[in-house]
Amino acid sequence: MTGPRARSVWDIALSILLLILTTLIGVFGALLATVTFATLGTCVGDCSLDGATSALFLAGAAAVIVVAAGVIGTVVALVRRRRAWWVALLTLVGVILVWVAGFLLYGVAVSG
């Protein structure tokens, strides 16, 4: 019977770095969404206030869910002594995609 796997220092460090970067991008997206909400008062004509608001709120909620799932997945992988950097990387990519989709939907809603 073999003992537990050795912890990989680079994997732990890279996972933490990627999760910190993910959090910073998530916060930046939330701040950008807040500023974008402030400009909704100038929305006239065919633009959909409900659609624009919904797009950004859904993107924010989805980003929080992606980050929570990614952090949990990364921690579980690290506790089980498995490679975890790829979970953190997928979390980063997921948060970026969620915010990009939210802002694209916002653009569609305000363009009429």
Image (cartoon, rainbow, N blue to C red):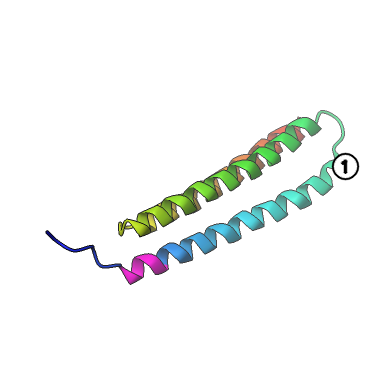
Q: Quadrant of the C terminus?
A: top right
Q: Which residue is drawn at 83% across and 42% down?
A: 40
What amino acid is at disc 1?
Gly
Question: To which residue does mark 1 refer?
Answer: 41
Helix, strand or loop at disc 1?
helix
Measuring from the top left, give residue 56's x and y in whole percent.
69, 41
| Number of numbered discs | 1
> Along the horizontal axis of the image, is 84 left or right of 94?
left
Majority secondary structure in the magenta region: helix
| Residue 55, picture quadrant | top right
> Along the horizontal axis of the image, is 36 left or right of 6?
right
Measuring from the top left, give residue 29's x and y in whole percent.
65, 52
The residue furthest front is 1
Residue 48 in sight here: no
The residue furthest left is 1
Residue 85 in sight here: yes
Q: Which range of residues does the magenta coloring cover?
A: 8-13
> Along the horizontal axis of the image, is 18 left or right of 105?
left
Measuring from the top left, give residue 12's x and y in whole percent.
38, 66
Q: Residue at x 30, y 67 (%)?
A: 7
Taking the magenta stretch, the answer to whether it contains residue 2 is no
Q: Which residue is drawn at 79% across and 45% down?
A: 37
Q: Quadrant of the N terminus?
A: bottom left
